[in-house]
Amino acid sequence: MPIISESTYQKFTLLQSKTVVIDNSTIGSDANECTFELPAFAYPVDTTDTYRNDFTSSLLSLTNRYSSPEFYLEKQNGCNWDEVAQLTDSTYGTYYTFASLPNWSGFKVEWYKVYNLEGANCYRIRQEYTSIVDAEVFVNYSYKYNLKLFTANLADKTTKISYNINGGLIGSTLDSSTKIDYKDNVWEREIRLPQSSFMFESSEYEREFTRYKNGGQEWTIDNQVETIQYNVRKIPYSLHRELKITALQSGMLFISDYNLSNPKPDMYNFKRVICSSEYAPIWGQYNTYSPVQLTFKDYYENLQRKRC
C-alpha cells in the first residue's frame, strides 16, 4: 500500500537583537566616577534667546549600506530609560534631510520644546539604522543631557561652543582612515561644557619703527593680537575627539561664557574665535576624563594702530 504524506512549508524571519554601536550616555558608570552628563538649558520666556536656550543636533551620515534612519528621545526614569517619542516632526525640534546626500538625515532637538512638554529631567537621543545586507538594527546613544530651566546661577561655570560645518570634507571622529563629505550642506552643532571657563585675556605686540641717524625711533605700526584662555576641567575621550577634530576644524566657531566671575560677560556672547594653540589634554591612568587648556584669538583683529 503506498504511503501518502503531506508537507507544510513556512518561511520564518529570524528576529535579531539590536546592536549598540555607541553609548555615550553611560560614560563613567563602570569606574569610581560619576556618570558623565552635559548640561542643557531652556528659556521658554524668550525662545529666540540663543544665549540662554540650548539645542543638540543629531546626525546620521549613512552610506548606501544602511537604511531606515530613525531618531528617538528618551527620558531617564531611575536606572532605566523610557522612550518619549520618535523624532519625526517639529514637536521637539526640526527633522532634516539632504538633497545631495540622500542617505543622510538629522534632527535638531530644541531643549525649550522638550522642557515645555516633558519638564526638567535627564534625556538622551537614540539613533537607529538598519543594514540592508542582513536586516541587523544598529543603535547609537548620545550623551546624557541634564535639562534645567536657565538661571544665571545654574549656568555658572559652564561654557557653550557653537560651530558650523560649512560643507566639504572633514575627518571622522570614529575612524582616522576616512573622511566625511558634507558636500554643499551646512550643519550646526552646539555643546555646553560643565566646569569650564572662557576668559583671562592677554596680548602680544608687534611693532615696526623708523630709526633716525641720532638713534631715535618712532613707531609706524603697533599691532596687538589678543588671546583668551579656555579651560575645561574634565571631559571624556569621545568628547575630546569631537572638539579637536570637528569643532576646531569647522567653518565658524563661537564660544559663550557663563561664569559669574567673568569681568565682562557681554563680550563672550557667541564670540567668534580661532584656535591658536595645540590641543593637548592632560591624560591620566585609570581615569576616563581629562582636562584641557586651549588658547583662542579673536576672529576680528582690529587692535592695530598706524601713524598717518
Image (tube, rainbow, N blue to C red):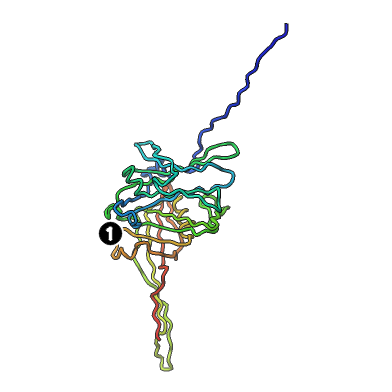
Mark 1 residue element? loop
Tell me the quarter of the image containing the C terminus: bottom left
Vertical order, 122 against 190 (above or below) = above
In the picture of the structure, the residue carrying the numbered disc 1 is 260
Extreme residue in the right direction: 1
Q: Is residue 174 above or below residue 3?
A: below
> In the picture provided, is 222 more to the left or to the right than 5?
left
Question: Of 249 and 286, which appears nearest the observer?
Answer: 249
Q: Position of residue 29 (x, y in %)?
A: 40, 41
Question: Which quadrant is the N terminus positioned in?
Answer: top right
Q: Residue furthest bottom?
A: 214
Residue 299: image x %, image y %?
42, 68
Residue at x-position 37% and y-position 59%: 231
Residue closer to the observer: 64 or 100: 100
In the displayed orientation, state which residue is furthest to the top: 1
Point out residue 252 in the picture as x, y percentages from the top left corner: 45, 62
Disc 1 residue type?
Leu
Query: In the image, what residue occupies the spot 59% across and 44% down?
Result: 65
Horizontal relation, residue 242 to residue 122: left or right: right
Residue depicted at x 29% and y 49%? 149
Q: Which class describes the residues within 10 Å of circle 1: few (<14), some (14-19), or many (20+)? A: some
Q: Is residue 36 above or below residue 292?
A: above
Q: Position of residue 117 (x, y in %)?
A: 33, 43
Q: How many marks?
A: 1
Snapshot quadrant of residue 157: bottom left
* Occupied quadrant, residue 307: bottom left
